[in-house]
Amino acid sequence: MKKLTTLLMLIVALSAPVCAKKIDVEPQEKQIDYLNIQWWDEFNDSTLHDYMLLLFKNNHDLKIAQLKIKEGEQIVKQSFANELPQIGLAGNVERVLRSSDQYFGKSMLIPNFSQTNLLFPISASYEIDIWGANRTRTKSIQKQLDMIKEDERAKYISTTSNFAAAYYNLVKCDKLIKIQNELVSAQNDLLRLTKIKFDAGKCSIDDVIEQEKLLKAYQEDLNTLNKDRRLIEEEIIYVLSDENIKNISDCSQVSIPKIYFPEQIPSDIIENRPDYIIAIKNLEHMGLDVKVAKKELLPRFVLFGQFGFNAYRLSNLFNNNAILSSFGVTPILDIFTSGRKIAHLKYKKYQYDEAFEQYKQAVLNSYKEVNDALVSAKIYSKNLESAKERLELENQNYNIANARFEAGKGTIPYLLQSKERKLLVEKNIIESDINTLISIISLYKTVGGKNLTEITQSI
């Protein structure tokens, strides 16, 4: 009982300086918040909603980002473990065989012998963190974990935004393909009527060639749209990572949502961006590394202890006279390291200066990306309004041409040409509408995944 009490007292003595320290690891249940499904529900598209949930469930890039968080947590725990006492058991059994006599002075002679040495100690050690170097090192690694968490949030914002943009590009392709088919059909009718006029001697061959060239151009545009549609479809299937999805059904009937965006963005919005936060965390991380490098120049003190048994026979191993114990403090100071530690300190200071420059660059990039996205959204929105005005004019022309034809004063070719002009403007409206929506999604991405509606209300 006395032996056990001594062992417990040794362990408690070594553990006491740090037993109150705790590691701060946040729970990893924030991914659903990173998805920000409330924002995507403002698009009022149940298909997009379902795709986002499927993306959250299956996407491999998002799963990799989650695993990196778990890896980072374990690295922090490893660093924290280095602050705690280290206790281990290292038993040893050896057989000593001496084949010659050994003299101690003139009168003492030990002849050749053989014996067994049994050693069974529990050893413990703890580096007394007087200067806080180990604690600072753990804080530095914690900053790295914070950076990994922001990388994960950035991955969610980027992946969901890119997917939504691809989805609405698919919607655009399907709507344009539908209109393009109408254009090809109308041009086929125009070509057929032009050939009839040519056969009747009422137009030249040049007119027929021009109509054929226009038909070929429309067909080429249709082929390009079909190609783009197939590529976007494959991208969506790839990102969803669901083997049950072989193709995406026609999206030409999907309504294009009207999403409002703020006319101006407050400058402090960049503080929500992952890259901005990462730049700050990296600056803090490098600052802590500089402190650690400075503290490594100071002496270290290691508290050590050992308790166990040492005997020459197994039957005597646990006797009182076989008890082995020791306790002490070892100061450690590197007197000469060829300038290695000084060079390491300077290296960390240069890294800190580099991190500061990266922070300033991150601020500039953030302002630029936000402004670029906002300008694009405004321009596309203006183009959309202009295209709608042109469509009203073309609708008037088409209605006039149709009324003349029904009254017997117009011709079918003129009516078909009016229809084509109207369809071309409808294509422009779809392109401007989707481009406006995608630029708004890009704006959402540049403000760090913050709902644009909330920004508008806060202004």
Image (spheres, grey):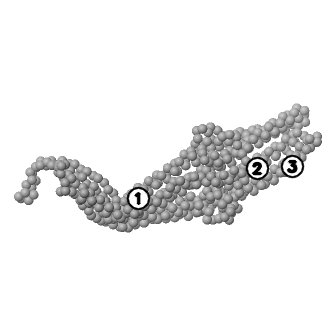
Instruction: State the residue at coordinates (62%, 37%).
Output: 246
Q: Secondary structure at mark 1?
A: helix
Looking at the rendered structure, the number of numbered marks drawn on it comes to 3
x and y percent of residue 200 in the render?
90, 32
Q: Is residue 375 visible?
A: no
Q: Which residue is mark 1?
A: 80
Q: Quadrant of residue 180?
A: top right
x and y percent of residue 301 in the render?
32, 65
Whether residue 186 sits left or right of residue 161 in the image: it is right
Q: Is residue 421 visible?
A: yes
Instruction: State the residue at coordinates (64%, 54%).
Output: 38
Outermost residue toward the top in this view: 199
x and y percent of residue 389 in the render?
81, 53
Question: Dot 1: few (<14), some (14–19), or many (≥20) neighbours within 10 Å?
Answer: many
The answer to whether 455 is drawn above or below residue 110 in the figure is below
Q: Secondary structure at mark 2?
A: helix
Pick whichever of labels 1 and 2 is earlier in the sequence. Answer: 1
Q: Secondary structure at mark 3?
A: helix
Instruction: State the residue at coordinates (30%, 65%).
Output: 331
* Badge 2 amino acid: Ile
Comparing 102 with 456, the one in front is 456
The residues tagged by marks 1 and 2 sit, at their Cα atoms, a distance apart of 59 Å
Mark identifier at residue 429:
2
Q: Which residue is mark 3?
A: 396
Q: CB under 8 Å between callouts 1 and 3?
A: no
* Badge 1 amino acid: Phe
Mark 1 or 2, closer to the camera: 1
Question: Dot 3: few (<14), some (14–19), or many (≥20) neighbours within 10 Å?
Answer: some
